[in-house]
Image (cartoon, helix red, strand yellow):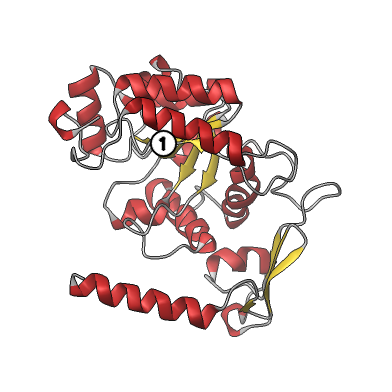
Amino acid sequence: MEERNGCLPPDSPVEHEDDILADCLRVIQAYHDPNPGAMIRVAVAPCSPFSVSRELMRDAALLARDQGVMLHTHLAENDDDIAYSLEHFGCRPGRYAEDLGWTGDDVWFAHCVKLDSHEIDLFARTRTGVAHCPCSNMRLGSGIALIRAMRDLGVKVGLGVDGSASNDSGHLLNEARQAMLLQRVAHGGDAMGAREALEIATIGGAQVLGRDDLGVLAPGKRADFAAFDTTAIDMAGVWDKVAGLVLCGPMRAKHTVVEGRKVVCDGKLMTIDLPGVLKIHADSVARLMAGT
């Protein structure tokens, strides 16, 4: 949906909706792997309800269900989102999503800061997931998502970092820390503990993504885990090492293993030429800032 039709994206980069759906289908059929342990899964994910038309939101859901893939978008991130939904759709975001087929255990939404009690109940009943992005919400002043209420009602909640335009870091352990602290700010010091925050960061995310093959260390699950040095100065004086990961961090992982493969070993990234990538990144930033 283009700017001239009342939406936010400018006209020039917008593709025709038939072309968008056709390319989504191409990517799904070429790359989506539905098998347990899959390293590549494709989801149909328009940016937000105010970035595409009602028809494209509906057709995106139909395409995803036909192909057996999940659905994702941003929803109810801030007060402007609510105002836009009421003005243009005549209802709140949760109702709009439900009307277009965007609820269910194959759907997850980013943010959901401004959900009301009826929408939280809807997500709980339909097993719709939420990707909580606390640092992005704080950076943009969006507000504090009602994660305590969502969890208490059984809404599936995982953690996200949002994009680089909305967050200056991609540190998931820090997101867990901030998720816990925000709930304490809003609801008191016992609103969320460190272990619950870590649960949201691990198995919570797996549940949101419909992955029953990962998220916990257990026989038969995928070998995905991170190891931290609890003897480092960050943890000095900590008697509860698990809580310390959230309360005293964030720290760098000493080892990270994905699908049984070492990605970080003794604090060093093993899978890319890090100095070379950083050089390319610095050059790109310089060109961007110079306007070239």
Q: In the image, residue 156 lies at what x, y percent? A: 56, 35
Choose between 285 and 201: the one closer to the eye: 285
Choose between 167 and 125: the one closer to the eye: 167
Residue corresponding to mark 1: 73
Is residue 226 visible to the viewer in this orientation of the structure? yes
The amino acid on which the numbered mark 1 sits, given as a three-letter code, is: Thr
Instruction: Determine whether 34 is above or below 139 in the image.
Output: above
Label 1 environment density (alpha carbons within 10 Å; few <14, some 14–19, many ≥20):
some
**Residue 119 figure quarter:** top left
Q: Quadrant of the C terminus?
A: bottom left
Q: In the image, residue 191 lies at what x, y percent? A: 50, 47
Q: In the image, residue 71 lies at what x, y percent? A: 50, 31
Element type at marker 1? Answer: strand
Q: Residue furthest right?
A: 219
Q: In the image, residue 277 lies at what x, y percent? A: 48, 76
Q: Which residue is depicted at the point 38% across and 30% down?
A: 19
Left or right: 233, with 120 as reference point: right
Choose between 141 and 192: the one closer to the eye: 141
Q: Which residue is depicted at the point 20% across and 22% down?
A: 88
Left or right: 63, with 253 as reference point: left
Q: Quadrant of the N terminus?
A: top left
Is residue 118 visible to the viewer in this orientation of the structure? no
Instruction: Determine whether 233 is above or below 209 in the image.
Output: below
Choose between 58 and 196: the one closer to the eye: 58
Q: Which residue is depicted at the point 52% across and 28% down?
A: 128
Give the mark count.
1
Left or right: 2, with 32 as reference point: left
